[in-house]
Image (cartoon, rainbow, N blue to C red):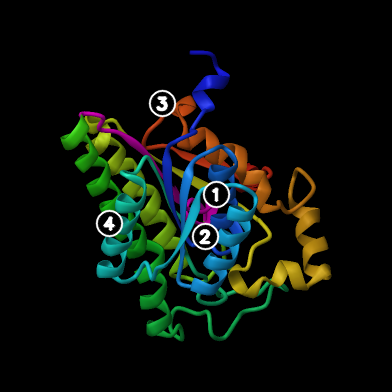
Amino acid sequence: MSTLDKFDIRGRSAFVTGAASGIGLAYAEAMAEAGAQVTLSDIDEAGATREAERLQGEGHTVRAAKLDVSDWDQVAAAFDDHDAAYGGLDICFANAGIDTGAGFWNPAGHRNPDGQVDTYDHKRWDRSIQINLNGVFYTVSNAVRIMKKAGRTNGRTGGSIITTASNAGLVTEPIVGLPYMPAKAGVLHMVRALGLELAEFRIRINAIAPGPFVTNIGGGWLKKDPVARKAWDAIVPLGQVAETDQLKPLALLLASDASDYMTGSHCVIDGGMMLGKFN
């Protein structure tokens, strides 16, 4: 097999959470463009359906599914539906996530009264942990269930799971909401633990840890505020906040056999932002 052949995922199936926009949509587009059969799932059913119809119009094999990753029963049913539609599961992106508010500093460097540990709304904390950590567990657990089932029926156990973590799970980010950081750190440690657990079944799991990307998270403020965008561009060592399309090659690497000796790893993609954190 040639090096390029190892990136070939034609005929495989992929399930993506949080796929109606942003990073999840980029993952779904990358999989569809590379020839995989894809389920775009999102709590935003209209958005997932719209994007699925667009990709279908471009000749790709995709379907949409409404999914709240904080609801175990919904997650289990969504994976069963994917299995029934595509005859198994080869690739899963556990991507869905939210930002439930600012951290203890705001971008201007002033303390945020709603972001302090003693004033932080516990309901916001619970919601962030439920989606950003528990939702990843629910997604990964059901992906593994389908991948193992395939092995029992045809002997081809295996697959690739990719989680969306964050560089905020690796270093302290005072402008990021407090629960987001331990949730993403938990995702990274879950990936390390499951890399070991799932290796026997040839199921690989790795994390992508993005830095500053232009998405809808946090209300899409980098899209709406050109002054803030310019300020962030200035502090990224490679010179700009990234667009989500820049995640597609890494997503394909981790989804394909090109990364068949990688598991339990986290891949930081942040334009060099974290380099200064350790200098």
- Residue 21 is covered by the magenta coloring: no
User: Alpha carbon of mark 3 to alpha carbon of mark 1: how far?
Assistant: 19 Å
Secondary-structure class at tag 4: helix
Write down the region rendered in magenta. Answer: 155-171
| Circle nearer the viewer, 4 or 1 | 4
Q: In the visual, does 28 lie left or right of 73?
A: right
Residue 178 spot, x, y in % from top left:
47, 70
Q: In the visual, does 71 lie left or right of 246?
A: left
User: Alpha carbon of mark 4 to alpha carbon of mark 3: how far?
Assistant: 26 Å
Secondary-structure class at tag 2: loop
Secondary-structure class at tag 3: loop
Q: Amino acid at mark 3?
A: Asp
Q: Residue at x 43, y 80 (%)?
A: 124
| Circle nearer the viewer, 3 or 2 | 2
| Circle nearer the viewer, 4 or 2 | 4
Mark found first going from the N terminus, 4 or 3: 4
Residue designated by label 2? 19
Residue 67 spot, x, y in % from top left:
40, 68
Q: Amino acid at mark 2?
A: Ala
| Circle nearer the viewer, 3 or 1 | 1
Residue designated by label 3? 260
Marks 2 and 1 close (CB-CB < 8 Å): yes
Along the line of sight, the residue nearer the viewer: 172 or 240: 240
Residue designated by label 4? 80
Mark 1 residue crowding within 10 angstroms, few (<14) / some (14–19) / many (20+)? many
Q: Amino acid at mark 1?
A: Tyr
Mark found first going from the N terminus, 4 or 2: 2
Residue 229 spot, x, y in % from top left:
78, 64
User: Alpha carbon of mark 4 to alpha carbon of mark 1: how far?
Assistant: 21 Å
Mark found first going from the N terminus, 3 or 1: 1
User: Alpha carbon of mark 3 to alpha carbon of mark 2: how far?
Assistant: 25 Å
Residue designated by label 1? 27
